[in-house]
Amino acid sequence: MTTIVAEGISKRYRIGEYKAGYQTLRDTLSHAARRAFRLEHVDHSLEELWALKDVSFSVDEGEVVGFIGRNGSGKSTLLKILTRITPPTEGVASIRGRVGSILEVGTGFHPELTGRENTYLNGAILGMKRREISAKFDEIVEFSGIGKLIDTPVKRYSSGMYVRLAFAVAAHLDPEVLIIDEVLAVGDYEFQQRCMGRIEDISTSGRTVIFVSHDMQAITRLCSRAYWLDSGRVMREGPSGEVVSAYLQGASGSGAATTFGAEEAPGTAVLRLLAARVVDMNGDIASTVDVREPIGIEVRFVVLGETGPLFPKLKLANDRGEVVFNALDPDPRWRSAPEPGTYTCTAWIPANLLNEGVIGVDVAVASMSGPGLVNHVNVPSVVKFHVHDPGLGDTAKGHYTGQLRGGVLPLLDWTTEFVEARAYETA
Amino acid sequence: MLSSPDVPITTIRPARRSGLPDVRELWRARDLALILAWRDVKVRYKQSLIGIAWAVLQPLLTMVVFTLIFGKFAQLPSQGLPYPVFAMLNLVPWTFMAGVFTLTSGCVLTNRVLVQKVHFPLLILPIACILVPLVDFTFSFAVGLGITWWYDVAIQPTIVYAPLFLLMLGMTAIGLGSFLAVINVRYRDVPYAVPFLVQLWLFASGVIYAADALPEKYITIASLNPAIGAITGFRWAVAGTPPPSTTMLGLGVLMTVIFFFGGLWFYRRAEPRFADTL
């Protein structure tokens, strides 16, 4: 059964409004005066911006659908329209069932009020009835782990406690349709994992969820389908894995393969970077890689003159900005100045090493020049790829389905023995 | 598109800029309206002694100043009441109205986080502004009655009509305040203008002088300000001073209705653009 239908949703902003909606009366008066005396010509057609243009989609009951896109792509505007915070300029949408939305954790929390008072306040803001909040109150406090401090003004809470309570309230919202925006962008890693777990629970409980996030990992894990928005239009729609891969290729400009034209090749007079690719074992470009398979990073550069000993280097970083590792090419030829010409270095990352998520590869080539190093090339995120774990239980996650911390997910050599069929006894 | 008998269907379409309220939606949001009003009261009286003292001190100190300047020095007529009683019985309802007006004029801006992050009938914002001044009023009114009693002025049984005049003041303040609240979304200079407007309004509202002391030819124009009739009426209800004339009261009620519904209509029409403009 279809729960959400949207047809031709468009939203127009006037540019002036978009940048800063408010102004002072004085500005308006002086502006009007200048216009009246024709000191300033205003072309109204140029002042428009379509944040969304003709967006149509439908969501079935119980489906978890993700919306991705870079900042300014129209995701947030779409959520604001679906949650009726702002009306569309054109188009119609209808939603079946009670709609709950979490566009921010802790909306309306007041620092002077106690945790208990804020729970009722925030619950009412999120659309819960007072009776509902009372019924779930103990559960909310339990989930938040706030304990006795529930009757303390929240201004005395640590930021962690504040966010935990706020999320606990939101997590107990019980509508048929839930719309969630970037909630995971707050809090520390542990907290984010907790939120993810809760959202996973919600999405498996048969509710319809619309989820917007920059976290591609979360999108592929939680959503069955995804829409990729760009400049207010739907670029692509389909199974979330496919849409995420397409987005990663298209969005950052750097997908799994980047080739530089002769004019734009980064580098110096003696060394230039030509291309980089992420390849699988068959040598095909791979934007999404199974964690259980090796990944090749291929870098091509040209040496144009005298350089001195070279240091070709890769740096891998995940989408939380953590450096996973740096690696240099140990080939003996780099120990002295290489002869001019084009080189291709391929680094093979073993299977079962990288953790899940988006990995960006920085490429740097430096050379020894006298006492110091000269960086000929240092390009961040030349290529990107997405590592995913199909969750079959044969990786370092075992049969755990959540996400583990850290840049790597190494499958270690475990030995496990059954010792004896007797309970351990204390002496 | 979608249809089903028992599940609520939300339809989202371009704003029609209707000035009429969606009463059903408003009723469904009553819990939120109450809790928002309760939040403001709670926050106001959190340091309870100072909170209540403030509500009482403001009209009380103004009364003292008025008594010294207008009662003793200028010797303005006070309809046979001791000037402190006269001033206090005017200032108590006036402070209520000024409070509602000031709060309402800023209600969208002070709640902008809510306006931008959740959907709710925005009409509850100005309406929820009445509670804090009302609570303040009960305290200052108690003190006002105490002063009346202290000066041996008999409190009249007509005091039961006092709430009607208070209603007039509240409706006027919400209407005009909502109008400014809309302007304030667009222009941030409103908060600077409000105290000034309140001050001017005070002089036009018969708080310092008795309305019937005005020259005949100005009374009709002055009556277009509902506050003058309502405050005169309030004083009549409590202390038995001459009641407002029929013209004054009639015009006052008419203007109250116009301000209240006009202001809220204006607010309602501007509502769909709040989240985008803030």
Image (cartoon, coloured by chain):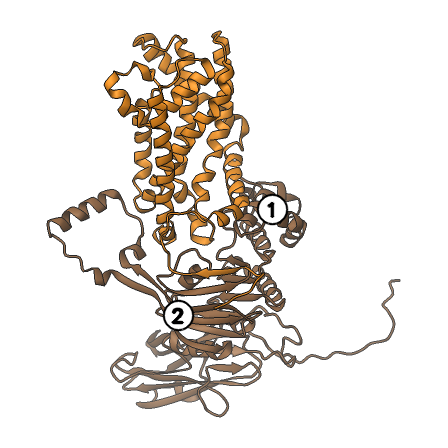
Chain colours: A brown, B orange
Q: Position of residue A118 (x, y in %)?
A: 56, 45
SS category of the residue bearing label 2:
strand
Task: Inspect the image, locate mark 1, and give the three-letter code of the amino acid beneath it.
Answer: Arg
Q: Quadrant of residue B267?
A: top left
Instruction: State the residue in front, A79 or A338.
Output: A79
Give the alpha-carbon distance from disc 2 to disc 1, as whole Å: 36 Å
Mark 1 falls within which chain? A
Measured as percent of width and height from the top left, residue B135 is found at: 51, 29
Type of amino acid at the residue the image marks with label 2: Val
Disc 2: which residue:
A55
Point out the tag, 2 or 1, that comes first from the N-terminus.
Answer: 2
Depth check: B141 or B40 in front?
B141
Looking at the rendering, in which quadrant would you find the C terminus of chain A?
bottom right
> Is residue A226 shown above or below A186?
below
Q: Residues within 10 Å of mark 1 (few under 14, many from 20)?
A: some
Mark 1 highlights which residue?
A130
Q: Is residue B30 left or right of residue B86?
A: right
- Chain ID for label 2? A
Q: Secondary structure at mark 1?
A: helix
Image quadrant occupied by the N terminus of chain A: bottom right
Query: Residue A105, relative to residue A327: is it above or below?
Result: above
